[in-house]
């Protein structure tokens, strides 16, 4: 079985997420939070996960996704959520055809939060599962 479409989409999605993480890397304010387990999460983690999951959901809506982050802390911190959303909106591929393959930009803050939360699969034996930890 060929996975060429999956590979193409995954590569484009990571390329787009890299645009965001590079901006975060070069910015002095990384926007780090501590999760419940006291591990750090940055705006790059949230933004990259949103961009990648959005692309995967657009192309493979029946696939499960296991992501590391969830958006509850962003719902509790609207200014941080807006900061991440601004970065997500700016992160576009130069090739409009490639950007279209990914489903285009995430248009609303709520859609970004939903994309982050879409990485909530518990895993298991049903269908295909994508595992995602974008910055690490």
Image: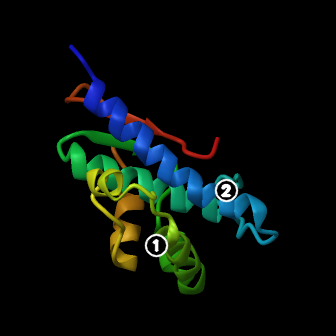
Q: Label 1, on which residue?
A: 89
Please provide percent x and percent y for residue 128.
Answer: 25, 30
The reply to whether discs 1 and 2 touch (Cβ–Cβ < 8 Å) is no
What residue sits 26% from the left and 32% below the top? 5
Q: Is residue 56 left or right of residue 43?
A: left
Q: Is residue 15 left or right of residue 43?
A: left
Q: Hey, which residue is sitting farthest top in the picture?
A: 1
Please provide percent x and percent y for residue 59.
Answer: 23, 46
Please provide percent x and percent y for residue 73.
Answer: 54, 71
Q: CA distance from mark 1 to mark 2?
A: 14 Å
Please provide percent x and percent y for residue 90.
Answer: 51, 71
User: How would you rate the neighbour count of disc 1 (Cα within 10 Å): few for under 14, some for 14-19, many for 20 or more?
Assistant: some
* 68 to 4, vertically: above or below: below
Decide which of tag 1 and tag 2 comes sooner along the chain.
2
Q: Is residue 91 left or right of residue 115?
A: right
What residue sits 46% from the left and 73% below the top? 89
Task: Decide if residue 123 is in sight here.
Answer: no
Q: Hey, which residue is sitting farthest right in the picture?
A: 28
User: How would you rate the neighbour count of disc 2 (Cα within 10 Å): few for under 14, some for 14-19, many for 20 or more?
Assistant: few
Q: Secondary structure at mark 2?
A: helix
* Residue closer to the observer: 99 or 34: 99
Q: Which quadrant is home to the N terminus? A: top left
Q: Secondary structure at mark 1?
A: helix
* Residue closer to the observer: 75 or 104: 104
What residue sits 62% from the left and 46% below the top? 135
What residue sits 33% from the left and 51% below the top? 55
Q: Label 2, on which residue?
A: 22
* Residue closer to the observer: 46 or 94: 94
Task: Decide if residue 83 is in sight here.
Answer: yes
Q: Which quadrant is home to the C terminus? A: top right
């Amino acid at each position: 079985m060929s996975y060429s479409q999956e590979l193409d989409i995954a590569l484009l999605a990571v390329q787009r997420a890299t645009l965001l993480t590079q901006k975060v890397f070069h910015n002095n304010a990384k926007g780090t939070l501590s999760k419940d387990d006291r591990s750090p999460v940055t705006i790059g983690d949230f933004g990259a996960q949103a961009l990648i999951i959005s692309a995967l959901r657009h192309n493979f809506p029946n696939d499960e996704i296991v992501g590391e982050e969830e958006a509850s802390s962003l719902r509790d911190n609207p200014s941080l959520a807006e900061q991440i959303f601004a970065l997500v909106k700016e992160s576009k591929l130069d090739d409009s055809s490639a950007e279209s393959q990914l489903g285009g930009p995430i248009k609303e803050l709520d859609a970004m939060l939903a994309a982050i939360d879409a990485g909530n699969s518990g895993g298991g034996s049903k269908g295909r599962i994508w595992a995602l930890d974008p910055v690490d």
